[in-house]
Image (tube, helix red, strand yellow):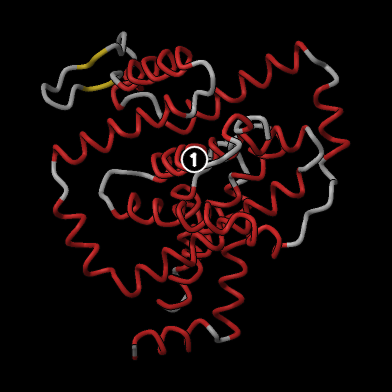
Amino acid sequence: MEALIEALGVISQPGSLLFLLLGVIAGMVVGATPGLTSTIAIGLLIPFTFTLTKYDAFILLLGIYCGSMYGGSIPAILMNLPGTPTSAVTAQDGYPMTRSGKAGYALTVSVVSSSLGGLFSCAVLIFLSIQLAFLATAFAGPEYFSLCLFALTVVFSTSGDSILKGIIATGFGLLIATVGLDPVAPYPRFTFGVMELMIGVPEVPATIGLFCVAEGLRLLTDPQRAASVKERVSSSARDVVPIIRRLWRTILKSSAIGTVIGILPGAGAMMASYIAYGEARRSSKESEMFGKG
């Protein structure tokens, strides 16, 4: 408890709040830029912390990380172009909401859920970090295999009416994942002599490029698509309180899923977001509306 009180005293300083604000703004700018992730944002802005105290530097980097995680949802919602791989799920319903004139509401839902999810994970980390560390170390090969298998089944459940499309997409993704060095026998697979593919297909360019190509083809078939979206981006956001009142169960479940998946080594935020999305769809009374905004 003394450490918590000391931390609250540090964060309440005007200088610390300023660094936190600057970090969040910088992180949102980087996250909203397609191709730049939270990891890249921290790497780019680390030199700015060399002259800071350890507390201010830590606060700045945390602000950058949290801001960039949310910033990726801005182009995902407005342009169907995820700024980060983890915001690919946001684009599935965020962009259809923009098309229907609810861009402001979608952005508000995104920032509210991101903020509450972050606060939930922080609270869990503060009070249960030691117990959860033991949970993470107990995970071994069989548990990770089960988790990955469960993640694949989530893809099928979020495929809508066409399960076949989900199976094809999952198989294609697994095929792409085989590119690179074999983890057991260090031999290149499907690299075709290209040295850049020895590490595999990079996740960020692949995810963003996939959405760019798909959106570009849609724009070619419907030239008025972009113009109609621009007219609707300015729609006003709803109040925060009604959003929390309506979505608090989904936010709470998704926060718990993200916290548990995030603690496990090797299981990233993208897996957590897809699992949370699949659970929200499964438990919704209007599951057929998912993917349509």
Of residue 107 and residue 47, the one placed in the foreground of this image is 107
Residue 282 locus on image (x, y percent): 47, 37
Residue at 45% of width from left, 56% of height from top? 255
Of residue 115 and residue 85, the one placed in the foreground of this image is 115
Residue 289 locus on image (x, y percent): 64, 32
- Amino acid type assigned to the residue bearing label 1 in the image: Tyr
Of residue 100 and residue 88, the one placed in the foreground of this image is 100
Which of the image's four quarters has the C terminus?
top right
In-image side of 104 versus 292 (left or right): right
Residue at 27% of width from left, 38% of height from top? 147
In-image side of 179 versus 164 (left or right): left
Residue 94 location, quadrant = top right
Residue 180 location, quadrant = top left
Residue 80 locus on image (x, y percent): 66, 32
Residue at 44% of width from left, 17% of height from top? 169
- Residue furthest to the left in view is 185
Residue 26 location, quadrant = bottom right
- Residue furthest to the right in view is 231
Q: Which residue is mark 1?
A: 277
- Give the answer, above or below, for where 157 lies relative to 163: below
- Counting labels gives 1
- Residue furthest to the top in view is 192
- Give the answer, above or below, for where 277 lies relative to 115: above
Residue 14 locus on image (x, y percent): 60, 85
Residue at 61% of width from left, 67% of height from top? 22
Helix or strand or loop: what does disc 1 sit on?
Answer: helix
In-image side of 259 versus 216 (left or right): left
Which of the image's four quarters has the N terminus?
bottom left
